[in-house]
Image: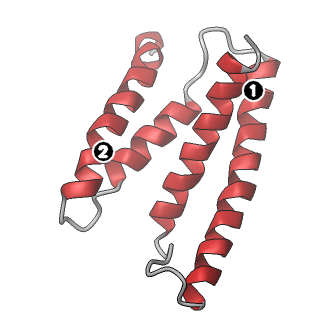
Amino acid sequence: MKHLSKYSKFIGLFLILVGIPILLTSRSNNPELPLLSGLFILFITNQTREDERSAAIRSSAALFALIIGYTIKLVISNLYQHQMISFDLISINYFLIMVFVLANIIRYSRLYVFMA
């Protein structure tokens, strides 16, 4: 089990790299699932040294990502209702993709960029 958790970050990155072209080119019913799975796996993976600080950063990143993501969703819906843009964010999977992208960006930037 230790080896699986060691490679889970690479599995998540692989699913993200595979999921982006699938999302953009596939005509299947759920082309977003590999990307969504990769983002989720990347977000829940533990650091090599998991402590209270990294757990707090992960939970606060999820909170900020939900707040920012829901704000973006409300703005997009409002612009769509006023016919200022031609698309609306109606699928929950695309909302989750946006939230996990934001959460991963916030988490890893706080871990490696701002705390370095």
> Disc count in the image?
2
Please name the residue that numbered disc 2 is placed on. 19
Query: Residue flagged by tag 2: what amino acid is it?
Result: Gly
Q: Are marks 2 and 1 in contact (CB under 8 Å)?
A: no
Q: Is residue 14 above or below residue 53?
A: below
49 or 87: nearer the viewer: 87
Colour scheme employed for the rendering of this structure: secondary structure
| Snapshot quadrant of residue 107 | top right
The amino acid marked with disc number 1 is: Ala
Q: Quadrant of the N terminus?
A: top left
- Tell me: 41 left or right of 106: left
Numbered tag placed on residue 30 in the rendering: none
Image location of residue 15, percent across then percent down: 33, 36
Q: Residue at x 75, y 20 (%)?
A: 114
Residue that appears at 71% across and 33% down: 58
Q: Secondary structure at mark 2?
A: helix
| Residue matched to label 1 | 55
- Could you say where residue 105 lies in the image, as x and y percent from the top left? 60, 36
Q: Position of residue 7 (x, y in %)?
A: 40, 17
* Residue 29 locus on image (x, y percent): 25, 68
| Residue beneath the point at 44% across and 81% down | 86
Q: Distance between the Cα atoms at labels 2 and 1?
A: 27 Å
The disc, 2 or 1, on the residue closer to the chain's N-terminal end is 2
Determine whether 45 is above or below 83 in the image. Answer: above
Question: Which part of the image, by quadrant, shows the C terminus?
Answer: top right
